[in-house]
Amino acid sequence: MGFTVILEEPENPGTIGFMARAMKNFGLSKLILVNPCPITAITRARAMHAWDVVQAAGVASSFDEAVAGFDEVIATTAKPSTDNNTTRAYLTPRELAGQVGRGSYALVFGRESRGLTSAELRKCDVVAHIEGSAYPVMNVTHAAAILFYELFSSKSSTMRTSDGREKRALVGLFSDAARSSGLRNPENAIKMFRNVISRAFISGSEAKGIAAVLSRFRK
């Protein structure tokens, strides 16, 4: 599996350095910065031995450009929505670590001041949330280090789990079936199915089996 870290519109040069340092501690090297602040001597001082990660970082002009082409896009948020109709599932870092398999993954972290927007979160396949105690909002690089630790301390599974593309295909098939079923509120059913699929540990063969049933129903 391959992970790329995406830092959305970092506002502080030191944040970029600290992120690179956390990445290198856990064997990550691919970083994309979206509309970043200037990289300065502070960035280099914070990065220390991970300065090469900063030097090799890609730069994107938009969120959509940064996340294009990945099998699955994983966002992080400090404040999960309380809306029952939310379109995304929320996982703990440990739950997320048990779900990842082969494929290319984007790990998206938001701005220091306000995180990711609701529109950006809706474009992601899965959202990871770290529950705090006295202070629920964590520093973005602290949250990143926790997520990196869980991802790389978990044991690799020999079973191939379905990736984001396969899950999106399942949601597409279910959406067609729901909209043609005569349900009073098919969009709500689609949102709930998307949440279930996003949280589920589905093998590749299981994804194919579900897709076959939904395809048959659509026909």
Image (cartoon, grey):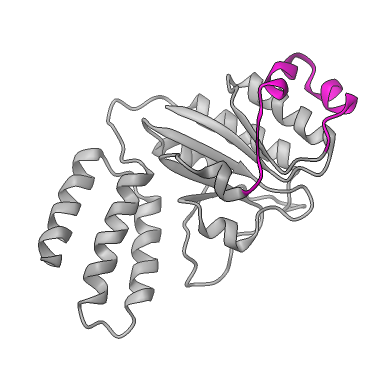
Q: Quadrant of residue 4?
A: top right
Relative horizontal placement of residue 177, taking residue 61 as reference (left or right): left
Pick out the residue farthest to the top.
49
Residue at the image point whose x is 83% and y is 27% from the top: 43
The percent position of residue 71, horizontal first and vertical second, equals 40, 40
Q: Main secondary structure of the magenta part?
A: helix
Q: Quadrant of residue 142?
A: top right
Q: Tell me if residue 54 is in the magenta stretch.
A: yes
Q: How many marks?
A: 0
The percent position of residue 10, horizontal first and vertical second, equals 76, 42
Pick out the residue farthest to the front.
61
Residue at the image point whose x is 31% and y is 37% from the top: 161
Residue in the foreground of this view, choosing between 86 and 124: 124
The percent position of residue 22, horizontal first and vertical second, equals 69, 26
The percent position of residue 45, horizontal first and vertical second, equals 86, 21
Q: Quadrant of residue 156?
A: top left
Relative horizontal placement of residue 196, taking residue 38 as reference (left or right): left
Q: Tell me if residue 203 is in the magenta stretch.
A: no
Q: Tell me the quadrant of the picture where the N terminus can be found.
A: top left
**Which residues make up the magenta segment?**
38-62
Please determine whether, in this image, residue 32 is positioned above or below residue 51: below
Residue at the image point whose x is 78% and y is 22% from the top: 47
Residue at the image point whose x is 31% and y is 41% from the top: 162
Q: Tell me the quadrant of the picture where the C terminus can be found.
A: bottom left
Pick out the residue farthest to the right.
41
Please determine whether, in this image, residue 158 is positioned above or below residue 209: above
Please determine whether, in this image, residue 107 is positioned above or below residue 29: below
Relative horizontal placement of residue 180, taking residue 4 as reference (left or right): left
